Image (spheres, rainbow, N blue to C red):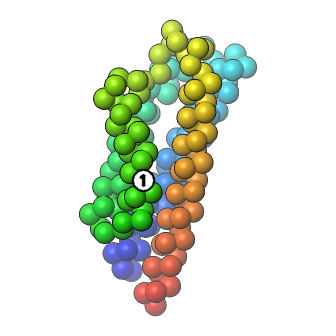
Amino acid sequence: MSAEAMVFLFGVIIGAALLFVKVFFVILISDLEVDYINPIELCNKLNQFVLPEMFVHAFLSFVFLISGQWIATAWNLPLVAYNANKVMNGKHMFDATEIFRTLGQHKKECFIKLGFYLLSFFYYLYRMILALVNDS
């Protein structure tokens, strides 16, 4: 198995994990909308995954960068920059006192990231299969 196939296999695994986290976010946000969960519980559950999700995505982008996968790096760079901007401005965590006011924005962001991770997952899967076919 070539290094390219290994990098994209790693991308597929990380992409699946990021997809799982975003689906978890969407489910919890929809639970808040129908009042199955209170805002404090929601924020406590989601905030423990916010920074790890951002760091894992940034690490994946770094792996693509050092392995010379320029298209994958360029694809991931805007989201890494967006996440870094949110962390630097201190707006990355969910706040229980303002969650109902910002729920629409958080929901929209979750769905956009979910779509991004879904497209990324299939791109990494395609590139992994392509690398494996080219190896044989």
Camera-side residue of 80 and 93 = 80
Percent position (x, y) of residue 61? 36, 55
Q: Is residue 107 above or below residue 52?
A: above
Q: Is residue 103 left or right of residue 90?
A: right
Location of the N terminus by quadrant is bottom left
**Residue name at image x 60 percent, y 21 percent:** 103
Which residue matches tag 1? 76
Percent position (x, y) of residue 25? 57, 33
**Residue name at image x 45 percent, y 57 percent:** 75
Q: Is residue 85 left or right of residue 39?
A: left
Q: Amino acid at mark 1?
A: Asn
Q: Is residue 94 above or below residue 60?
A: above
Percent position (x, y) of residue 108? 61, 33
**Residue name at image x 55 percent, y 50 percent:** 116
Percent position (x, y) of residue 131? 45, 79
Q: How many marks?
A: 1
> Which structural element holds mark 1?
helix
